[in-house]
């Protein structure tokens, strides 16, 4: 069976490293599926270069031709939200492979990336045991930054951690002077960092030079795609997510490292790989690329993927994922904590009550030595 697949990733522009990693995951999955004889996929690619207005235009161009009914792509929540009206007009389906801030369900999206209870909640729970008392919040000035830091502010306050300041940097900007001054003056124990792209690299480099000493930095969006850019400035950063390189099956890691632009296997690469494979297998099972029938097939059973076992909830349309907390050491991630198995996505945090230290959690984190 053959079908056309739209790929919309910003492989140039302010968050090019993430787009390049995700595109590499899609290309690897397409090659593997062809070799295994599952399906043959013709990729129809577009590069919006990180320009928000280009996502709607390019997705309209892809879908209006009538051959593409599924798109894998978009990195930022901004871009995902711009795609949704076009998907709705054409009855198409977006397979979104990136961590996001939650509080969304749409009939034209399959949310394959981590939801808040897969990243921010485990990260805050990790902080609860570190003794931090003062926090500073810093993010890129768009949806991901606003919403992840809003959630961090609420959860840290429940722990009794004082929020010293909160600042947003324009997407792609490397001017972190105001944030650096506020951090130097306030002396936080921890910085919650939701910056992406060049802003992230510039901030960590400047923070490493702080004369008063560097506070702990935690993040929900750092991945192997960032490691080369961060260099030694990334060491010590603690991140949460649904995949880190040490976790992948050895054969996949070897192939993915060869395919990756920087030789690293990030969550962006791995989740995109899993998304393309799951989509292709669902099309093969359904015998059609009709989005409704494909989603029905995809959500009918659990799937073994490079992320571990996942199930797509037919109501929330989110993937169950296994949360992990990791630390950068020697320009690699080392796993600190992992959940023992996949956790159902809770995009609206309906299961969240009380302070993070008392979260009702049927799958408590365990220490991985």
Image: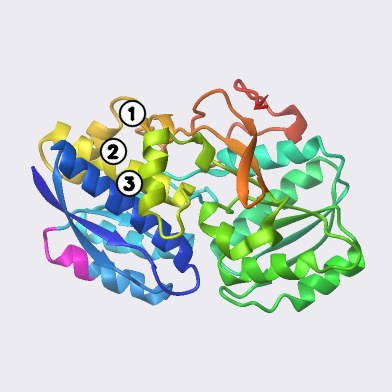
Residue 346 visible here: no
x and y, in percent, of residue 239 in the image = 64, 47
Q: Is residue 314 above or below residue 189?
A: above
Distance (Cα) linking label 2 and label 3: 18 Å
Distance (Cα) linking label 1 and label 3: 21 Å
- Element at label 1: strand
- Element at label 2: helix
- Element at label 3: loop
Counting residues from the start of the chain, the first of labels 2 and 3 encountered is: 3
Bounds of the magenta span? 61-67
Q: Is residue 46 above or below residue 360?
A: below
x and y, in percent, of residue 95 in the image = 33, 49
Query: What residue is pinned by disc 1?
Result: 303
Tell me which residue sits at (91%, 64%) in the image: 212
x and y, in percent, of residue 298 in the image = 27, 34
Residue 65 magenta-highlighted: yes
Asked if the residue at tag 2 contacts the one at tag 1, i.e. Cβ–Cβ closer than 8 Å, the answer is yes
């Amino acid at each position: 069976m053959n079908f056309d697949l739209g790929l919309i990733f910003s492989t140039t522009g302010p968050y090019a490293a993430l787009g390049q990693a995700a595109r590499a995951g899609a290309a690897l999955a397409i090659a593997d599926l062809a070799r295994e004889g599952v399906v043959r996929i013709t990729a129809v690619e577009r590069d919006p270069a990180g320009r928000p207005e280009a996502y709607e235009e390019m997705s309209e161009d892809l879908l209006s031709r009538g051959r593409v009914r599924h798109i894998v792509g978009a990195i930022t929540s901004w871009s995902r939200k711009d795609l949704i009206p076009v998907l709705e007009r054409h009855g198409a389906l977006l397979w979104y492979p990136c961590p996001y801030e939650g509080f969304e369900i749409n009939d034209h999206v399959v949310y394959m990336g981590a939801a808040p209870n897969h990243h921010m909640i485990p990260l805050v729970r990790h902080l609860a045991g570190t003794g931090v008392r003062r926090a500073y919040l810093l993010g890129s000035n768009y949806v991901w930054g606003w919403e992840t830091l809003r959630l961090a502010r609420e959860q840290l306050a429940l722990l009794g951690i004082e929020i010293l300041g909160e600042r947003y940097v324009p997407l792609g900007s490397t001017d972190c002077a105001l944030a650096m001054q506020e951090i130097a003056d306030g002396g936080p124990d921890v910085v919650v960092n939701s910056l992406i792209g060049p802003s992230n690299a510039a901030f960590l480099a400047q923070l490493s030079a702080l004369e008063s000493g560097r506070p702990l930095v935690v993040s929900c969006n750092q991945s192997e795609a960032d490691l080369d850019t961060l260099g030694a400035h990334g060491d010590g950063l603690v991140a949460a997510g649904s995949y880190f390189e040490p976790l992948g099956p050895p054969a996949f890691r070897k192939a993915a490292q060869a395919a990756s632009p920087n030789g690293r296997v990030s969550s962006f690469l791995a989740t995109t790989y899993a998304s393309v494979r799951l989509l292709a297998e669902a099309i093969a099972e359904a015998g059609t690329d009709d989005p409704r029938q494909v989603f029905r097939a995809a959500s009918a059973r659990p799937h073994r993927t490079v992320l571990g076992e996942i199930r797509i909830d037919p109501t929330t349309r989110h993937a169950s994922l296994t949360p992990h907390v990791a630390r950068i050491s020697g320009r690699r991630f080392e796993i600190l904590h992992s959940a023992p198995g996949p956790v159902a996505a809770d995009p609206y945090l309906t299961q969240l009550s009380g302070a993070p230290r008392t979260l009702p959690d049927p799958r408590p984190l365990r220490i991985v030595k």
